[in-house]
Amino acid sequence: MTISFPNPSRNFDSTRNAVGFVGYDDLFVVNFYVDAGALAKAVGGEYSQSDCLSAFDAQIDLIHNAARKVYSRSSGTTYTLKTTDF
């Protein structure tokens, strides 16, 4: 259950109000989302799409580490990271 993040792509998903990114566990694709509220704390309470993407980019290592921890607890295919995951 080792997850890696070789693809730096991310996008804002307005339906989920979150930034989405992809991880890989061997050949399995795992979708992750970071809730805009969690990212808003990193940018002082603002959470426009561009602010969220900028906050994501600035905190990429922290986000990937949180995603690894969440993924290690259970192997699913989709996760949403919340403030409590950081």
Image: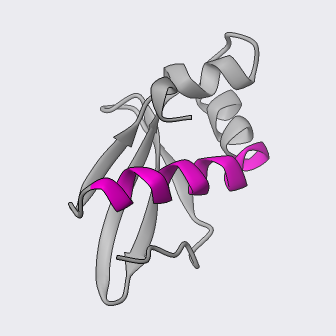
Q: Which residues are magenta?
A: 57-73
Q: Residue at x 32, y 32 (%)?
A: 16
| 7 versus 52 height, above or below | below
Total marks shown come to 0
Q: How is the image coloured?
A: one colour
| 14 versus 66 height, above or below | above
Residue placed furthest toward the bottom? 27
Q: Is residue 66 left or right of residue 31?
A: right
| 35 versus 13 height, above or below | above
Residue 72: percent from the left, percent from the top? 36, 61
Residue 31, located in which quarter of the rendered image?
A: bottom left
Residue 64 lies in the magenta stretch? yes
Residue 78, located in which quarter of the rendered image?
A: bottom left
Magenta: main secondary structure = helix
Quadrant including the N terminus = bottom left
Residue placed furthest toward the top? 45
Q: Is residue 14 left or right of residue 43?
A: left
Residue 53: percent from the left, percent from the top? 65, 40
Q: Is residue 36 left or right of residue 44?
A: left
Quadrant including the C terminus = top right
Q: Residue at x 48, y 59 (%)?
A: 68
Residue 52: percent from the left, percent from the top? 63, 32
| 1 versus 61 height, above or below | below
**Of residues 19 and 27, which is closer to you in this image?**
27
Q: Residue at x 20, y 60 (%)?
A: 76
Q: Residue at x 22, y 62 (%)?
A: 77
**Of residues 43 and 63, which is closer to you in this image?**
63
Residue 63 lies in the magenta stretch? yes
Residue 74, located in which quarter of the rendered image?
A: bottom left
Residue 81: percent from the left, percent from the top? 43, 38
